[in-house]
Every structure is written in structure tokens, then in C-alpha cells.
Amino acid sequence: MAAVSRAGFYRGWEEKAPNEAKIAPREVVQRMALAHRQYGYRRIAPLVQREGFAVGAEKVRSILRSDNLLAIRRRKFVVTTDSAHRFRVHPNLAQSLELSDINQLWVADITYIRLRKEFVFLAVVLDAYSRKVIGWSLDRDMDTRLPMAALEAAIASRHPKPGLVHHSDRGTQYASNEYVKRLEACGALLSMSRPARPWENGKCESFMKTLKKEEIDARHYATFAELEHNVNEFLEQIYNRVRLHSALGYLSPEEFERSQKPGKKWLPAALSFLRHEEIYPDV
């Protein structure tokens, strides 16, 4: 009756009224990207999906790219490990563990942070199963007192049972008599990475990169007190409780720990060694 084809009608309607199904997800993507400026498209995608929109990671990346909202990364590698010492070096046990619960493997590391007029140092202890920061310490000196404070905080919050494995690099702080004896008093086993192999402590190295990218590099700190306050807020309020982790099915560390089966009997991590054909596949 109107002498207009069906295709012409819908084409004209789309030109006059934008498709709400396309606009609404884009608005959510933009809102999430601005609220979480250091998140990449893989972490923004599940946030958008939680809002009820069935969008994939590639679609989110396309929207972020077109709106100039892709996160910018700064990459830096600084050596802070002194392994030239007389203390005993322990073998790498962590690489052979199959984790199934918290408090089976802790990983620890130290990094430096530059303030306006000085350098300070941060030591952390993470639960490797949930990636949760369970102990940390800031100090102006990088002696054994620094990681000891982080370790004591972890022990106080977790009360580990004998059989825990503690993994770190082979720096003098972690190999010192004081640090080793404290772990042995808890019934823990020590594990250390080999020299020049940061990937053997990859979970802690990944955390340090996240901390630098999403907190340290995003601000300019003037004083030690200011840094300590903001690091505490980031670790306790954002990283542990809110920040999504791809390795945890896009849950935060605390969400992941709450999702575990309650009342499960704790056991040490199982050992799993590579078979001969996995090491030498061509033989």
C-alpha cells in the first residue's frame, strides 16, 4: 500500500533509529574501560558479560581500538637478585608440583620502586594457587628484614601446615639463615629458581608486572608514607578483592578462594615429573 519494499523499509528505519542492541554493549565497554584503565580487552570482556551482554573478547577489542581505549603497557626488566653468596641453594621443587589447594605453594619476590628522592623496596608473598597476596612489606633497605616482614605477615594470616613449599629466587635474603630457619620452623620446604631464569618464578614476576603497570607507573609518589598507603589500598582492596585474573577463570583471588569446596581436607601438593619421552620426544 505504501509502495515501499520490505528491505527498503528496514534500511530506512535503521538509518533513522540506531540499533539499540549495538549501542548498549558499546556504552558498557566504554564504561568498563574507563573504570579499569589498565585492563586489556580479555579482562574487560567478562565484565561486560556480567552486565548481560553476549560479546566476545575480539568484539571488545574492536570497540576499544575504534574508541582509542586500548591499554598502554610499559615494559622494563631490572635485576635485583644477588645470588653470589655462601648460603645453601635449594633445588627447584615448584616446577614439579600439581596444585589443588591454597597453602601448598607460596612464591616470593622483591622489587624496587622509585620515589622522587630515593629508592625503596617491596617484598611480597603470594599463594600460587589463588594468586592472592598474603604478605608484603616496604622498606628503604633490601636486607633480610624486608622479606622476613612479608613472610611473618603471610604466616600470621595463613597459619600454614607442614608440607608447604616456599619458592623464591636464590638471592641472599631468601637463602639467609634467619629466613630459612623461620620456614623450617613451620615445616615448610624451600625451593629456588636457577640463575637468570625469572620465568621459574613466573607467577610472582607476573604479579610484579601487574603492580607496576596498574598502580606504580600510574602515579607519581613523593614520600614513603604516600607510597605505603596506596600500595596497601591496591593490594588489599583492589588486587585481592576486585581485580579479575585470567588464570582463575576471570575471578578475583578472594572470589576464587571462596569458590573452592568448603571443608576439603588439606594435603600437600602432589609431585609430577616429566616422562622420558616428554623430555626427549625425538629419542
Image (spheres, rainbow, N blue to C red):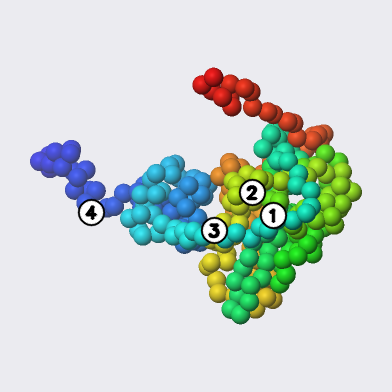
Residue under the image location 67 percent in, 75 percent down: 224
Q: Secondary structure at mark 1?
A: loop
Contact (Cβ within 8 Å) of mark 2 with mark 3: no
Q: Secondary structure at mark 4?
A: helix
For disc 2, the marked residue is 195
Contact (Cβ within 8 Å) of mark 4 with mark 1: no
Q: Earlier in the sequence, mark 2 or mark 3?
A: 3
Give whichever of 122, 225 is nearer the camera: 122
Which of pointers 4 and 3 indicates the residue nearer the eye? 3
Q: Earlier in the sequence, mark 1 or mark 2?
A: 1
Q: Amino acid at mark 1?
A: Ser
**Quick one: label 3, few (<14), some, or many (20+) residues within 10 Å?**
few
Q: Amino acid at mark 3?
A: Phe
For disc 1, the marked residue is 83
Which of pointers 2 and 3 indicates the residue nearer the eye? 2
Contact (Cβ within 8 Å) of mark 1 with mark 2: yes
For the C terminus, give its image quadrant.
top right
Gap between marks 4 and 1 measured at Cα: 69 Å
**Quick one: label 2, few (<14), some, or many (20+) residues within 10 Å?**
few
Contact (Cβ within 8 Å) of mark 4 with mark 2: no
Give whichever of 8, 78 is nearer the camera: 78
For disc 3, the marked residue is 77
Q: Amino acid at mark 2?
A: Pro
For disc 4, the marked residue is 16
Q: Is residue 216 visible?
A: yes
Which of pointers 4 and 1 indicates the residue nearer the eye? 1
Gap between marks 3 and 1 measured at Cα: 17 Å
Name of the residue lying farthest toward the right: 185
Q: Earlier in the sequence, mark 4 or mark 1?
A: 4
